[in-house]
Amino acid sequence: MPRDRAAPSPANRPRPAPAPKPPTASLGFLVLAYSVLGWSIADVWKPAWLWWSLAILVGLSLSMVLSVPIAYWRSPVLRWFESELVSFFSVFVGAFTVVLLLAWIHFLLVGLLLFSAMALARLDLLTARFTPWQSFLILATASQVGLALGWMLHWLTLI
């Protein structure tokens, strides 16, 4: 039976691209950073339900903010500063926020640790060619697993 010349031979067919591998080192650092936060919430901070819900919200919102491409953030930020009055109030609120953060340096350092760990993981996911949606899911899962792991380890050491 003659072979159809229009169909490519099996050797010449394009192979599917391999699935990207998640960066284990930076995701491990992210889980470790959030587990330290989970441990400290379980150990010290009261009321616990408020801090747990805030930590979960911070993990999800940081995942979402870092997963969105930068092109979506440029135009709203530039339009925000077109008015002089809005620019003045933005600078005033920003300065007040910096003073509050310096007064509560412990919270600032914890926030910087969480942000830097998540930014490192996001950059590694970006170089591994994950889509923004996949990056969001991986970052959100890693942060929530880290919180739960820190709480579980704290609970297990009290037994």
Image (cartoon, rainbow, N blue to C red):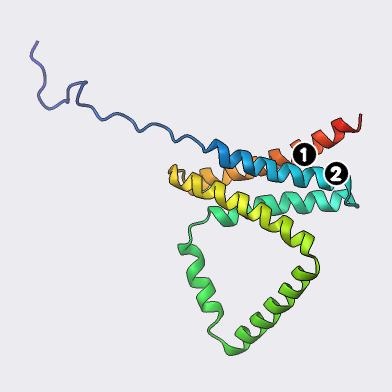
User: Tag 1's secondary structure?
Assistant: helix
The N terminus - image quarter: top left
Q: Nearer the viewer, residue 34 or 53?
A: 34
Q: Amino acid at mark 1?
A: Gly
Q: Residue shown at 54%/52% (left/top)?
A: 67
Q: Residue shown at 48%/69% (left/top)?
A: 74
Estimate the x, y position of residue 77 in percent, counting from the top left. Answer: 54, 73
Estimate the x, y position of residue 153 in percent, counting from the top left. Answer: 80, 34
Question: What residue sits right under mark 2 in the picture?
Answer: 42
Q: Is residue 1 left or right of residue 150?
A: left
Estimate the x, y position of residue 52 in percent, counting from the top left. Answer: 80, 48
Please identify the residue farthest to the top as the structure is shown: 1
Q: Residues within 10 Å of mark 2 (few under 14, many from 20)?
A: many
User: Tag 2's secondary structure?
Assistant: helix
Q: Nearer the viewer, residue 6 or 93?
A: 93
Question: What residue sits right under mark 1 in the picture?
Answer: 150
Residues marked 1 and 2 touching at CB (< 8 Å): yes
Up-down relation of residue 5 to residue 124 (above or below): above
Q: Amino acid at mark 2?
A: Ala
Residue 54 falls in image quadrant: bottom right
Q: Residue shown at 70%/78% (left/top)?
A: 95
Circle nearer the N terminus (1, 2): 2
Q: Is residue 155 left or right of residue 59?
A: right
Estimate the x, y position of residue 80 in percent, counting from the top left. Answer: 56, 78
Residue 92 showing in the rendered view: yes
The C terminus - image quarter: top right
Up-down relation of residue 149 to residue 125 (above or below): above
Q: Nearer the viewer, residue 112 or 9?
A: 112
Residue 121's disc number: none
Q: Residue shown at 85%/44% (left/top)?
A: 42
